Amino acid sequence: NSLSTSTSMQSNYSPVVTTRESLQALTNSSAVLHLSPPCPLTSSHYQFSLIPALFVVFILGLVGSSVVVVVLCCHTDPKTVASIYIFNLAMADLLCLAILPFWATYCVQGYNWFFGSLMCKISSSVLCLNMFASIFFITCMSVDRYHTIVHPIHIQRRIPQQAYVVALVVWGLACLSSLSTFYFRDTYYIESLEVNACIMAFPYKNYAK
């Protein structure tokens, strides 16, 4: 019936995004526990495959991005527009790698966040910052390459100072795009799952009209 269907849907909750009302219903409802137990958040097979993958990504990404930053800082002269964009792209990746151990620990602990509300907000915002900054800088590199091929004479007028200004604007836009994540992301204790989850919880009544 509709009651069992609704309860079953609540029990399949994933601690990623929800509204505050549904989150409160999940944490306070005893029917979720008795009628349909939630799916387990821990799986040995899942963890044994995910954690090594995160470790490999962390090591390779750290080495690769660090090499790019060092080479562009110390061995590239004069600076070019393309090298400035690549440098900023590598810095965005290093920011993402810096918070990757927190999310690896989060997965190992069965999605139980131990690092506090502020780190939940910061770690989530850095992930979004990396995503937006990477997209924007790759777009800048694509536009620059297009002008280099299609308008080779006009593109010679460009100077590295223009790329620095563009990079500053890109970082500003990426930060602005990540503000919503910083505002809505927080830690919530989900009693039925017995975890302190770091999730996005939107106020349904105020924002879903």
Image: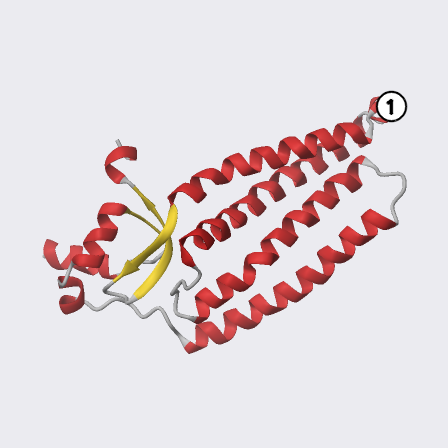
> Please, what is the three-letter code of the amino acid marked with disc 1?
Ile
Q: Is residue 137 left or right of residue 25?
A: right
Q: Quadrant of the image for the C terminus? A: top left
Closer-to-camera residue (172/37): 172
Q: How many numbered dots are placed on residues in this image?
A: 1
Q: Is residue 104 left or right of residue 11?
A: right
Instruction: Locate residue 198, reporting x and y percent.
Output: 39, 56
Q: Secondary structure at mark 1?
A: loop
Q: Up-down: is 207 above or below 57?
A: above
Closer-to-camera residue (117/32): 117
Q: Quadrant of residue 29?
A: bottom left
Q: Residues within 10 Å of mark 1 (few under 14, many from 20)?
A: few
Instruction: Locate residue 168, reporting x and y percent.
Output: 67, 33
Q: Quadrant of residue 37?
A: bottom left
Which residue is painted at 23% across and 36% down in the image? 205
Q: Up-down: is 102 above or below 173?
A: below
Q: Up-down: is 208 above or below 50?
A: above
Q: Quadrant of residue 98?
A: bottom right
Q: Which residue is mark 1?
A: 153
Q: Is residue 16 visible?
A: no
Q: Quadrant of the image for the N terminus? A: bottom left
Which residue is painted at 27% across and 60% down in the image? 190
Q: Is residue 202 visible?
A: yes
Instruction: Locate residue 123, reporting x and y percent.
Output: 50, 53
Which residue is painted at 40% across and 53% down in the image? 117
